Image (cartoon, grey):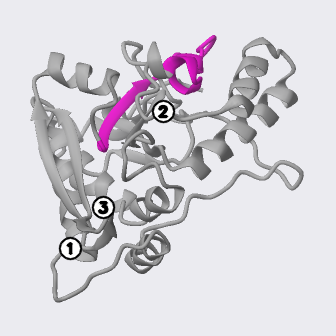
């Protein structure tokens, strides 16, 4: 469309952000990923900028937490997710005893007298090209530091079953968020591990209390404070590794001026005009 002169003469291409986020999930019930050090290590080989370019063709706004309009301040600072760093990945794996020995392609450690190589299963929906491309990029980055990732495509029903029973190590997903009145408990509460979408097994009593308070709070300042507290716990946990807010292209007539694009929920047409 951008190269169509009849279109480009009267319209300009804009990017419109969806209310939602794309994440890479690390299953805390996985025997290998139960360790905080190992999950943190894996987070360092996720290159968000490259994912946006390679998987979404540049249509994405980098993000690290699930909320829109969150306001960080000195009293309630929002943590920043560390960036891509293979050396940091190797360091944190070393804290859990993983190392390369004897010229091996992959890291390993001794468990119960046997040498175990660092191998992870990336489970994804077979018909989802974005999830497949994400897996290919993760596999490449992981191999460079000595981690073997096996990509396992499943038909959608089998994929959901695998998520619900927590039978995976890594996955990729996307969550759409309604602008108002959206409940995050089905995603992040520990009750949602058995009956919800908390496939990665995030949370504890403290995060549950934050969520339960957030569900009832009406004061904007307190809502913002609680969202920061929950976001920081999500970042520390390295289970829901939120990558970006997806974008879509939109054509805007050049006769309009002084407009701005606001995030939209899927099914609601952008943009807002001022």
Residue that mark 1 sits on? 106
**Quadrant housing residue 115:** bottom left
Quadrant showing the C terminus: top right
Which residue is disc 3 drawn over?
50
- C-alpha gap between disc 1 and disc 2: 27 Å
Helix, strand or loop under label 3: helix
In the rendered structure, the answer to whether residue 202 lies left or right of residue 123 reads right
Which residues are the magenta region?
A: 169-192
Whether pointer 1 and pointer 2 mark residues with C-beta atoms closer than 8 Å, the reply is no
Residue 244 is drawn in which quadrant?
top left
Depth check, front residue: 221 or 30: 30
* Percent position of residue 173, x then y: 33, 33
Tag 2–tag 3 contact (CB < 8 Å): no
Helix, strand or loop at label 1? It is loop
Q: Provide the residue designation for mark 2.
A: 201
What residue is drawn where x is 45% and y is 47%? 61
Against 147, residue 216 (above or below) is above
Q: Which mark is residue 70?
A: none
**From the viewer's perspective, is residue 271 above or below residue 200?**
above
Identify the mark nearer the N-term, 2 or 3: 3
Bin the neighbour count of mark 1 within 10 Å (Cα to Cα): few under 14, some 14-19, many 20 and up. many
Given this view, does label 2 or label 3 mark the residue nearer the observer?
2
216 on left or right of 245? right
Do residues under tags 1 and 3 come within 8 Å of each other at their CB atoms?
Answer: no
Task: State the image coordinates of residue 272 (x, y, percent, origin top left).
Answer: 52, 23
């Amino acid at each position: 469309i951008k190269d169509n002169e009849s279109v480009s003469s009267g319209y300009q291409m804009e990017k419109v952000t969806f209310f939602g986020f794309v994440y890479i999930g690390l299953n805390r019930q996985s025997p290998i990923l139960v360790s905080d050090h190992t999950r943190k290590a894996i987070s360092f080989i996720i290159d968000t900028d490259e994912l946006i370019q390679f998987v979404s063709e540049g249509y994405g706004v980098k993000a690290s937490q699930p909320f829109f309009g969150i306001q960080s301040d000195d009293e309630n600072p929002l943590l920043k997710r560390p960036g891509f760093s293979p050396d940091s990945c190797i360091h944190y794996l070393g804290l859990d005893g993983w190392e390369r020995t004897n010229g091996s392609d992959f890291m390993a450690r001794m468990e119960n007298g046997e040498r175990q190589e660092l191998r992870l299963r990336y489970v994804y929906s077979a018909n989802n090209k974005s999830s497949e491309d994400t897996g290919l990029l993760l596999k490449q980055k992981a191999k460079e530091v000595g981690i073997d990732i096996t990509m396992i495509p499943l038909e959608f029903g089998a994929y959901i079953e695998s998520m619900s029973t927590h039978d995976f190590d890594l996955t990729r997903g996307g969550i759409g968020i309604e602008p108002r009145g959206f409940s995050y408990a089905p995603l992040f509460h520990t009750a949602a591990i058995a009956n919800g979408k908390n496939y990665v097994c995030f949370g504890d009593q403290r995060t549950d209390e934050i969520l339960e308070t957030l569900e009832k709070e009406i004061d904007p300042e307190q809502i913002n404070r609680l969202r920061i507290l929950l976001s920081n716990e999500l970042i520390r946990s390295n289970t829901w590794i939120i990558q970006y807010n997806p974008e879509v292209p939109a054509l805007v007539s050049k006769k309009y001026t002084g407009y701005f694009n606001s995030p939209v929920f899927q099914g609601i047409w952008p943009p807002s005009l001022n």
